Image (cartoon, helix red, strand yellow):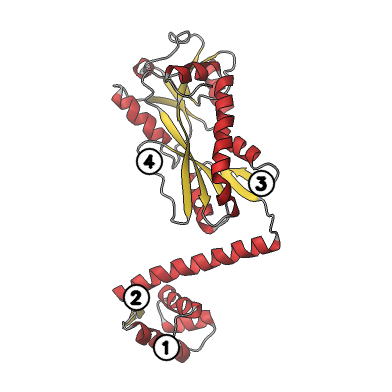
Amino acid sequence: MRLEVRHLELVVAIADCGSLRKAAARLHLTQPAVTTQLKRIEDHLGGVLFVRAADGVKLTPTGADFVQEARSMLTQLVTLERVTRRNADSPNAPTRLAGIPAHHFGLLVGALKDNVTSRTIKETGTLTALLTTGELDLAVLRRFPGTPLTLPPNVGHRLLTREPLFVGVPEHHPYADREEIPLEALAEDKWVMPEPDDSGMNAHFARECTKAGFEQRIAHFSSEAHVALTLIRESGAVCPLYPVGGTPPGVARLPVVGNPLVREVVLAWRLDAPVAADVDDLCEQVAAGYLKLVEESNVYARWWRAQSLPPV
């Protein structure tokens, strides 16, 4: 006897249902057939997977390990079928990309040219799940200090950029005309922060403010950049700003002394996706495009040169 997919499905069904009778109904088999098949599987493996209980059957430790691996293999088979059918139906199927609405995302779409479909998703957990199931080929994720990025074994990843986070202040702020601002100078200011999510950004800011000797005074939550910028101008609040991009009237974009606020932008891809072979070239194109964006931002270009980074 050799283990087959139907054997894995039978054992998982018994574990899910908690009884041979219910598993038989799910699998459209008779209970004696399920009992016989389970006995053959256990004899082949040399160990008991289930023990009878008053209300059905319970997994043994051996059975629990078996079911865990069986679930993983069944999931991989589903993914294999999905990917194979997709490639068979359309050998030139577009690369499926999703990720955070960072500039790297747009640069990646440009590098993939016309053969791409994309959508922006901020939640790290959602992006990871879609990569795991094969519903995405590529993803752009963010990683903040103190919150590790955990990806499944079938997904590769590479750091695209480790960039500073600047601060936006109103034009009448005491530091608005400076080239940089100490974090502790913002101790009395009210903050606009994005809604907390699983990226760890808000927790990172809170820790760094504590290190600087104050507790962050968050007055507003908004994940929309235009709302945050309006709040800076109209209410005098301050907020995080990514370094790339222009600064609207009434707002000053300032680097923070010592660069305590950072994020990493990470590219992740399925190892079995056709685009995996092009990752090196895609990363080079994104890096070149990002340097052009640095050059177009006066504040960021000045900061970049001050760090003795490669010229822009």
Q: Is residue 108 left or right of residue 64?
A: right
Mark with earlier residue (2, 1): 1
Q: Quadrant of the C terminus?
A: top right
Q: Secondary structure at mark 2?
A: helix
Task: Please give the residue where the numbered disc 3 appears in the rendered image.
Answer: 116
Measured in 3D between alpha carbons, the distance from the residue under mark 4 to the one under mark 3, in whole angstroms, is 30 Å
Contact (Cβ within 8 Å) of mark 4 with mark 3: no
Task: Please give the residue where the numbered disc 4 appears in the rendered image.
Answer: 147
Task: Please give the residue where the numbered disc 2 appears in the rendered image.
Answer: 63
Q: Amino acid at mark 1?
A: Thr
Residue 295, position in %: x, y?
56, 20
Mark with earlier residue (3, 1): 1
Task: Please give the residue where the numbered disc 1 appears in the rendered image.
Answer: 35
Q: Amino acid at mark 2?
A: Gly
Mark with earlier residue (4, 2): 2
Other-residue count near label 3 (Cα within 10 Å), few / some / many at <14 / 14–19 / ≥20: some
Q: Secondary structure at mark 1?
A: helix
At 49% across and 8% down in the image, what residue appears?
Answer: 172
- Kindly indicate the quadrant of the structure image that contains residue 189: top left
